Image (cartoon, rainbow, N blue to C red):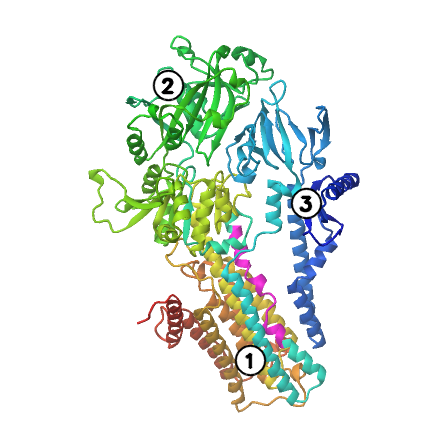
Amino acid sequence: FYTTLSVLLGADPPPLTVFATSSHHPVSVGLFCKTLMEIFVCTGLKLLSVLYIYTSVVNLPFLSLYFRLQVLNPFYVFQVFSVILWMCDNYYLYASIIVVISFISIGVSLYETRKQSITLSNMARLVTRVTIRRNSGGEEDCVSSDELVPGDCLLIPQEGLLLPCDAVLLTGECLVNESMLTGESVPVLKTTLPVGEKKYCPETERRHTLFCGTQLIQAKGGGEDGCGAVAVVTSTGFFTAKGHLISSILYPQPINFRFYKDAFKFLFILGFFAFIGSIYIFVVLYKAKVSLKTLIIRSLDIVTIAVPPALPAAITTGTIYAQNRLKRKEIFCISPPRINVGGKVSLFCFDKTGTLTEEGLDVWGVMQGGPAGFSDLVPDPSRLPPGPLLSGLACCHSVTLLRGHALGDPLELKMIDSTGWTLQEPDGDSRTLDEEFGISKVLAVMRPPSHCHHSQGAVSLAILQRFPFSSALQRMSVVTVSCGGRAAFAFIKGAPETVAGLCRPETVPPQFSSQLRHFSSEGLRVLAVAYKPLDVNSVCLSVLREEVEEDMQFLGLLMMKNLVKQESPKVMDILRVASIRSVMVTGDNILTAVNVAKSCRMLGAEEKVIFVIATPHTAESRPTLRFIIMFLSSQHQYQGASGYHLAISGKSFAALCDHFPEDVPKVLMRATVFARMTPEQKTQLVKELQNMNYRVGMCGDGANDCGALRAADVGISLSEAEASVASPFTSKTQNISCVPLLIREGRCSLVTSSSLFRYMALYSVVQFCSVIILCTVKTSPGDLQFVLWDLLLVTLLALVMGLGGPSEELQPSRPSASLLTLPVLGSLFIHSCVIAVGQIAALLLTFSQSWFVPLNSTVFGTENLPNMEDTSVFDLSGFQYIIMAVVVTKGYPHKKPIYHNWIFLGLVIIQFAVMVWLVLYPGSFFSHYLQLYNFSDMNFKLLLVAMAMLNFFICFDVEVSEVSQSFYFEGILHCFYKCERVSALFKRGIKVP
């Protein structure tokens, strides 16, 4: 990816690193570096390094590089160390099987890695022929997109193209599909960057920026013939929006999740016990006067047993199964570790429009307004008399035509449809429309219905300039001209409070606030419309947005009904039962938001709503913070309501954070509705909630929620795209029913990962105890005995343990994400004690038999096989591997009961039957190859099986001690839980009675 050219010219002043993108041609690099050096020499700056970034593709490494990366993985390094050790200890068969399995694992990993790299490379590689201008003469040149550099003027054809770079639009308009980046399935209209002196920023100027990887569907108004558009390249390669997406996939941000930290910490705990075991083995064997080779091998071998190298890989199987189940439900994930994080979500934020409510809106009515007040409500805007309000509703939009079909925001489509006006755009040669309206570069024409044309005074209007809707500004505006260029008008629509603030005060009706409050409290989406006449001569040139959107004349209000999706109330009920807070974050009016929150049962019908009003510091007043109970009509007064919720607007939220930071946590603890929030404020809110130790989820359509979706611990974008940079999760189901499903899968995955972690730890304990005990009596397990334990028992159980799906309902409790808590460590300690005591008891039971014959003490290790000591310990430990798998698989209430995982249950039954058979009737063939002693005493063998069953009941009771009352281990675990709770309360400064 990188070619580094280092030029050290001195240590001070501080070195400067320059990042540059260029084509891959050496001549271009050389010219660039030469020019750069001349600049630095002339300015006296010291250059440390020039980093040339290869901009075209993600190169595919050779298989040899993949292989080296895999082999250098700590897991495989440890495996190589273990295999060498086993070979030296004559465990040839076991070591050979592990080598074969490791090579198969590496091969599968290489195949999957290569497959993913090819997919990513195909996604990243975008090479096409584009037309550009690079000099002031205006000469056009057709070049490969690999050769694009920032500053090139890109000529976009009318039919559009798949954009290979980031660019800012200089002339014309483009209809763009940005679903890959934002998850927004509705095409977006991009307009010309307005003239101004402020610094260009792609984040704040998204409506004028074309992003790499997006599909330009149509371009118009930028060429000499009115077709196509012109843009200037701003970024290429990994500096583009698509490059950031590729980078986020290649190098995902580390997840601050306690479970993963504790898993690696626990490896050090196991390492400590391995160290103790090595010392014990060393002392025992030293006293037995074994050879130096045996002493070293046996002391190191205990490390490979106590620290399972497969532990990190094993705990990810639950996540893999959960990811596959989510994919079948059309929920796609680009960051699998976040599935486990989803199991700890305690608060979920929801966007309103398109998320909780339907994307489309129905026009409810319109009211004209002026200095004398508001007129009567007109349900159908097409019945309005010809005038500025009707013209404003028809013209103030960003809708465009694609092959005769109107595309744009569903709200604007409904608004235009309600007026009855039709949209016309230049088709091929635009001179016809230019001549009709006496002005050049007409973007679109709005024509009234034929039955009211001229006779009722309605005239066609041409749209010359658009200032698209901005979430930060909460408004949009257009510049229009009438036929023949006789008159020009500017129309604006947007949030009523914002539009009224841009109008002349005398034109705003006195009843504006009361009418707005009335309609908003009914749950209606309210927009205000205003206009002003313009000088016809001035509109021939580019007009600044600031000049257009001032001194407007108020025209009226448009009300639209936004219906709540039928799934929204059901999901809110589910989350409430699961003790997960629901929060609405929207750019709509606060009263509308409160009404929708009540409709979807985010707020209870009898719960109080208190508005938080915060004002910033001004020249006339100091900052203030007030709390006002929402006014309700008499028939809806709160009666006996015990709960309350806070509602706050974006302006108050900003003032609260700036002037009352100490009150922010108190407000956020009870706030449920956040209205008139800008995209930046949504992101800030998510981070503030995370600072309060909430695990925050965010669900939105991706359009204005990208920052919040990325900042949240679990972000879900409702989109038709399978993956987008907007969030780690993408759901093709266009409602919030995906939220409880994801949380259920997250809890199931987290419980499964925890169970697998505990099982792998206990597996090490079982084998650790077996080796220590047998080493004490100068013997050790045989080669095939290890194969049976590790492969036929443990590996198969670990692979199918995570197949059980999540429970059907969300429970109020959340699974623990910590592996180092007293309950977890306490249960592991008790299980370990039961395991050790059981194996020692089996050995002592063998010693106590009248027919017992001690092994040959003159030899050591496998040379003593078969013998009675090894066989009794082998029999019981084989049962313990199965018992521990059953015991730790308990996942209720977050997983389905064990009998739903019929593969795991069937495997357990088969393995248990095999172990019973090996204990009772092993036969000469298996006794010979497994190096087992064939006891002739059937009562003794039945006693071994009975000991295994007792081991199971004790360990099972330890795990379900909340239900069972029969064993005293319940009191031990209860003590662990109580100690942890007392410790937590003590840390918070709460006295414990």
Q: Are marks 3 and 1 in contact (CB under 8 Å)?
A: no
Residue 397 in sight: no
Mark 2 closeness class: few <14, some 14–19, many ≥20 residues within 10 Å: many
Mark 1 closeness class: few <14, some 14–19, many ≥20 residues within 10 Å: many
Helix, strand or loop status at disc 1: helix
Quickly name the residue at label 2. 382
Task: Confirm whether the magenta stretch covers residue 487.
Answer: no
Helix, strand or loop status at disc 3: strand
Q: Nearer the viewer, mark 2 or mark 1?
A: 2
Q: Find the magenta span and give its range.
A: 302-324
Q: Position of residue 151 (x, y in %)?
A: 67, 33
> Is 288 located above or below residue 574 in the figure?
below
User: Which residue is drawn at the image coordinates 68% and 54% (left, top)?
Assistant: 110
Quickly name the residue at label 1. 873
Q: Compare residues 991 and 160 and report the one nearer the observer.
A: 991
Amino acid at pointer 3:
Phe
Q: Earlier in the sequence, mark 3 or mark 2?
A: 3
